[in-house]
Image (cartoon, rainbow, N blue to C red):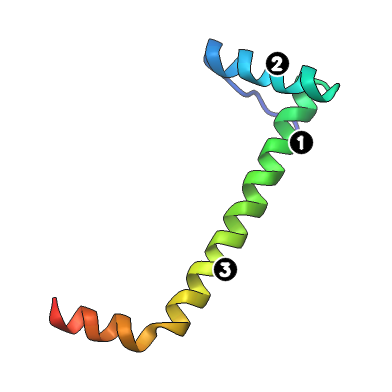
Amino acid sequence: MAMTLRLSEAEDEALERAAERRGISKQEAAREAVRRYAEDDERFAGLVARGIDRYKDVLDRLAEGA
């Protein structure tokens, strides 16, 4: 799926430097960044959900005292 990504000059320069360091195109660097972000976001959401489940009793008691 195609899309247009508008970057500030600083963001574009950072993307170009990252792509050059890795020997890949800016497009591939951006795609990889999106994949990594999505994976990290899913991992974080899972950690939060597990933390809430694990500490539910404590969180409930804290909420009652608020």
User: Mark 3 — residue?
Assistant: 46
User: Mark 2 — residue?
Assistant: 16
Question: Which tag is nearer the camera, tag 1 or tag 3?
Answer: 3
Amino acid identity at mark 2:
Glu
Q: CA distance from mark 2 to mark 3?
A: 32 Å
Using the image, determine if residue 17 lies above or below residue 37: above
Residue at the far front in the pictured view: 21
Q: Quadrant of residue 47?
A: bottom right
Q: CA distance from mark 1 to mark 3?
A: 28 Å
Say which element carries label 3: helix
Looking at the image, tell me whether mark 1 or mark 3 is earlier in sequence order: 1
Residue at the far left in the pictured view: 66
Using the image, determine if residue 15 lies above or below residue 46: above
Q: Is residue 46 left or right of residue 36?
A: left
x and y, in percent, of residue 27 in the image: 76, 24
x and y, in percent, of residue 53 in the image: 46, 82
User: Mark 1 — residue?
Assistant: 1
Q: Is residue 6 left or right of residue 27?
A: left
Q: Residues within 10 Å of mark 3 (few under 14, many from 20)?
A: few
Amino acid identity at mark 3:
Gly
Using the image, determine if residue 24 lies above or below residue 55: above
Amino acid identity at mark 1:
Met
